[in-house]
Amino acid sequence: MNLHDARRRRRLSWEQAKRDLGYRDGDPLNLGRLCADRHVDEGRGERVALIHEDHEGQVRRYTFRDLMELSNGWARFLSDQASVCQLDRVCLFLDRTPELYAAFLGILKTGAIAEPLFPVFGEDALTARMLDSGAAAVITSRRHLGKLRRTRSRLPDLRTVVVVDAEPGGQGLRQGEMAFRMEDHRDARFSAAATHAESPSVLHYTSGTTGAPKGALHVHGSVFAQYLTSKVVLDIRDDDVYWCTADPGWVTGTSYGIIGPWSLGATQVVLDGGFSSERWYGTIERHRVSVWYTAPTAIRMLMKDGLDPVRRRDLSSLRHACSVGEPLNPEAVRWGREAFGLWFHDTFWQTETGAIVVTNLPGMPVKPGSMGRPFPAVEAAIVEPGTGVPIAEAGRVGLLAIRPPWPSLMRAYWNNTAAYYGKFLNGWYVSGDRASVDDDGYFWFCGRDDDVINTAGHLVGPFEVESALLEHPAVAESAAIGKPDPVSLEVVKAFVALRPGFEASEELELDIMNFVRKRLSPLAMPQEIAFVDRLPKTGSGKILRRMLRARELGQSAGDLSTMDGG
Ligand code: WT7
């Protein structure tokens, strides 16, 4: 029977996830235990959980028993020696090493909140997120320690920096820094904190149009959604080898790079290291990857390298492929058919939704360019901006909205109640994306309803870029917009008015670009800077990014009167 069959759709509910996981309402629930210890308890301890390949190509395998012992070691160390308490925010600032994955589960076992950070973040990006959350500890490696040291004086709540690869005896470490070598601290037993479905678990920062990035807070019970969607959408089965290409600094890398697959007891591959089509195809071939979850920018990068590298490999293990993060263009879907004989199944969700909400299910006919239909346990609609009233008419564009509650909906924006409540309207959670729905109930993405830039699937807040630009001594005023890009969807373009005494030049452009790269990240770095005399503004002084963007696209800027103060 096809999954999009109406009866089956109705029968799929979050209750099924609870039943599968042996959970009854009110039971203690701890994600760290559920993703590791439970498999040992149920006789799956010797199954491979993680096939890890480092940047030199060295492969290591970890069973669920290994994961249990290593995360226990982390939990004991964090609570006994690093004085981490329940609900403390503990940051992960690591490359995709095995330590990152075990520590994530270990943090959750202590009842603290895991806050993953992108290892490419520079000092300003780090400071904004760690300061807002009041992080008590951060786990890092020597490679990233320098950046953290430069933020320390600005982070009064930060008590401990844990270094996973310090010299023996912790030589060279400073006060407040501790060495912890994971492999020396395996522990067969740790009694995990008695967290519940509503206990906070993970804090992911995401960018908005205005203000600093916002921390979306999730709870242990999010797993009901991550489990069921991993099973039904990603179609991960017992004998699969699953590969999610996302970094856990991004919610895809935790919801579907840790929690989803390991709640199922699945074997997954982690590749630490940058992109190259040779490496990626080699990974699929070497580890016999059968289920693959990736992003449109990556697919377009593979497309650029053509079919030859595909033909030189045996990729016959691939059975199912999914995509997330940006619009998946029809050409990419068609190319996937040609290259791998597979449909890339587009999935839509957000940091805030915690799990896939609109999707193409396996077996469902794919309409290239459409994001698919609401996940069977989810109610989604297109609503009128301003009122939140659902639009019945097929093809009319409105805002994509989801009916609360569902298990993985964020429970708060950290320290920002107003912004949290601002996401709900007329009984709907409003995503902030514009979309329409067709007669068959398929959803079509149109664009974001705000100024946030989506570069290679990563959201970059224009405000954060503009703030970094303003710190440069030559910059008087700045605006950042997304400029369309054939591979990355958008790249950051900055408009800069210089202070008196500074002259526009290529050197200055490069200097400003590097300045932003170091402060924020390579993703947030403007790929292009336009030097202008002044920036277009509303009467109240707000920069009209949309006008700049419309000019960039060669369009008319439309009716700008609504933007003043609105
Ligand atoms: C934003 C959310 C998706 C989880 C990781 C990113 C865009 C996401 C799609 C898609 C078109 C998409 C939206 C959304 N987006 N999936 N399938 N088609 N756009 O989470 O960083 O919070 O980004 O990514 O604009 O709001 P995020």
Image (cartoon, rainbow, N blue to C red):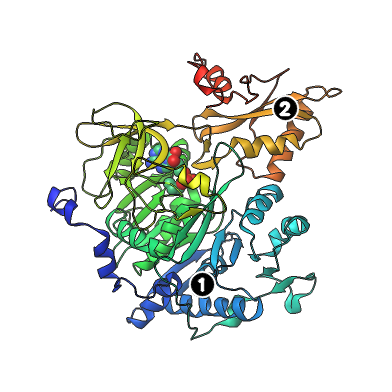
Name the residue at 71% across, 45% down: 519
Q: Would you say the beta carbon of the disc 1 residue lies within 8 angstroms of ligand 1?
A: no
225 above or below 266? above
Name the mark on residue 466: none
Name the mark on residue 111: 1
| Secondary element at tag 2 | strand
| Secondary element at tag 1 | loop
- In the image, 211 versus 517, the foreground residue is 211
544 above or below 414? above
Give me the C-alpha separation between circle 1 and circle 2: 44 Å
Which of the 4 quarters of the picture holds residue 430? Answer: top left
Q: Residues within 10 Å of mark 2 (few under 14, many from 20)?
A: some
Give the residue at the far top of this rendering.
556
Q: Is 504 placed left or right of 316 in the picture? A: right
For ligand 1, give the image quadrant.
top left
Give the residue at the far bottom of this rendering.
188
Label located before the other in sequence (1 or 2): 1
* Residue 514 location (% of width, % of height): 72, 39
Name the residue at 12% across, 52% down: 7
Which of the 4 quarters of the picture holds residue 510? Answer: top right
Name the residue at 63% across, 32% down: 527
The residue singled out by tag 2 in the image is 477
69 above or below 102? below
* Residue 390 location (% of width, % of height): 28, 34
Q: Is 468 placed left or right of 294 in the picture? A: right
* Residue 208 location (% of width, % of height): 54, 40
Q: Is 508 placed left or right of 74 in the picture? A: right
Residue 307 appears in the figure = no
Q: Residues within 10 Å of mark 1 (few under 14, many from 20)?
A: many
